[in-house]
Amino acid sequence: MSKATSVARRLYRAFAVVILVLLVTGAAASVAAWQQYRSVDALTRQVLPERLANSRVHLVLMESQRGICNYLLNNDPNFEDVYRDSRREYEFAAKELRRTTVPADLAAVNLQLDRASAWFDIAGRQREVQPGSDEDVCFAHQGGPVFDEFLANNAHLDRTLTHRGETLQDQTRTVELLAAGTLIATSGLGILVAIVVAVRTARRIKRMFKDEKKQARAQAREHAREQARAQTRMREAGMRIRENVSVDAALDAAARVLGPAFRADLAVVRLAGADHQDQRTAWWSAKEQNIGARPLSAQPVAWLADRHARGDVWRSGDVRTEPNGAPDRERAELLAAGAVSALTVPFGTGSDPDGAITLVRCADDEPWLPAEVEAAAQVASDVARWVQQSHLYEREQRLEAQLRDLDRSKDVFLSTVSHELRTPLTSISGFVELLADTASGPLTDDQRRMLEIVERNTNRLRGMIEDLLTLSRIETGTFKTVREHTDVTDLVSRAVRAVGSPANVTVYAHCPAQELVAEIDPHQIERVLTNLLSNAVKFMPAGGEVVVSVREDGDDVVLSVSDTGMGIPRDEQSDLFTRFFRASNAVEASIPGTGLGLTIVRNIVANHDGEVKLQSEPGEGTTVTVRLPRERVLVN
């Protein structure tokens, strides 16, 4: 008898003993469970419902007594209603008690209900007589003992049911203890048998498989070495692939690296285009002169969708005899390339494969090892990520080129618009000035007002063009700041004079008596003041005030423009310096504007290394403060 047969026989015997122990344990547990079920069933289906029904009858009788007594003492109709309702509820309670009563308690229940009915008869006659009369007293003396008998019978039945429930609970606990003891004993026996058999069997198995362990260790070491080699190849392949940024270059690098790294005779990397059309293919062959047309270059990868979703690969130890679900055209091209064993790993970042890596060996007895399959799958994941990044890089390059074209088109457009609009605007402005000077004859008041409107809109259009050109120069980096020592108080005075005296709006200027010289670009800072004053006047209702001030704060120069206008909604103030943004209340009031003034102000102040802040309360006004850096300031 061989060692294997002896071990098997010992195991069979051990299993037979363990199964017998389990059967005994199961039988004991079944008996215990049945006894527990019977006890719990009696407790929940008989004792508890009967006890609850008995308690309900007790409560109904007590409520009826309370109602009739209070009615007779106080002559209150509400208590009479309490009695009548309780009398009706008693019928249902009595019926429920009879339904839930077991035969052993039926006599006690009938006696109790008989006393209850007798008391209701006395109470009904008592309710008909005059409260406080002799008849009332007589009925009270008759009903008292009857009610006491009812209470005694009710309490006796409740004690009986309570004792019965406690007895059932004690039985349940006793059965549980017996079942637990039986289970522990049988389990201990089973464990003991299992330990004895396990120890004896382990000794035989240890002797029998001593040589096999040595062989397994050798195989494990070889597998570890192969896995380490595969990991090394995978890292080298990943580094070579990551050196490329375009999609085609990444595919070519993957094919050139994966073939030698995995000792393949042929490596093909396929990438599906949009809707799996217009595929890109890169391939490498150890014997390029023996390969005709590029293999698999026209074969789709959609047939790998299920495997990609499962995280699986396609593998064949011999393509000639094991197609393993590969399409006929795929298999035909592999055979035409001389493939014997083949491995195809789908890759992609979504649910559908974006492409596949196919590795082919043309020699017999060179199957793909599990470590190689795992390494190829990891490389495929890297290829998927880098192909996606290459796609993003190419898309970014296209978008960048488009943006450059758009930027050039915008510059050309703005330059053209500036030139084409400035020329007619200059002519319009000149002719308006000539007409206003009565060069062609005297003007009526209506004509003069019309010319003022034309002049105002001409200036407005010229300002819009200047804003657009300034913003374009800022964005293209051609907006230069030329600093020189400038009296800021003089700039404020000139800006206030340029605004003039708008109708129904008062403009004040608060400036120090001495010069306040700063190293700034005077034209740009004057543009800042003009934009801020124009906004303040434009959004000002009749009778409003605008205050412009300049002061020295340490080594800084602080410009401030305050108005008592409509203000700006709080939730929109953070967007005011965004180009083309206009406050909602200004839009609703149909006040003209481009939304570029504050954007230009912010950029000019930033070019001076300063800061601009805005404070506003809706309906109260707005204050814009510009602070220029101290290292650029000189005070005389």
Image (cartoon, rainbow, N blue to C red):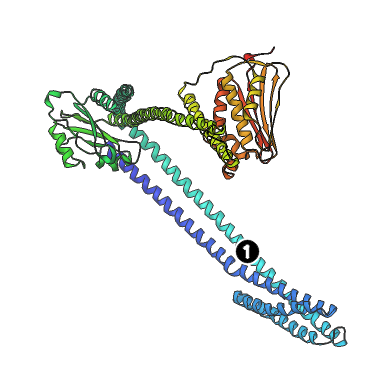
Q: Is residue 83 left or right of residue 429?
A: right
Quadrant of the image containing the N terminus: top left
* Residue 578 in sight in this render: no
Q: Secondary structure at mark 1?
A: helix
The x, y position of residue 283, in whole percent, is 21, 28
In the picture as drawn, the residue positioned furthest to the front comes out as 441
Q: Which of the 4 image quadrants contains residue 105?
A: bottom right
The x, y position of residue 476, in whole percent, is 45, 24
Q: Nearer the viewer, residue 282 or 329?
A: 282
Residue type at the position of mark 1 = Thr
Q: Nearer the viewer, residue 154 or 634?
A: 634
- Residue at the location (83% across, 82% down)? 140
Q: Which of the 4 image quadrants contains residue 223?
A: top left
The x, y position of residue 187, in whole percent, is 47, 47
Mark 1, other Cα within 10 Å: few <14 / some 14–19 / many ≥20: few
- Please give the residue where the numbered disc 1 appears in the rendered image: 167
- Number of numbered discs visible in the structure rendering: 1
Quadrant of the image containing the C terminus: top right
Q: Is residue 132 above or below residue 534?
A: below
* Residue 373 in sight in this render: yes
The x, y position of residue 151, in whole percent, is 75, 74
- Residue at the location (59% across, 17% down)? 520
Q: Is residue 248 above or below residue 157?
A: above
Q: Nearer the viewer, residue 422 or 172?
A: 422
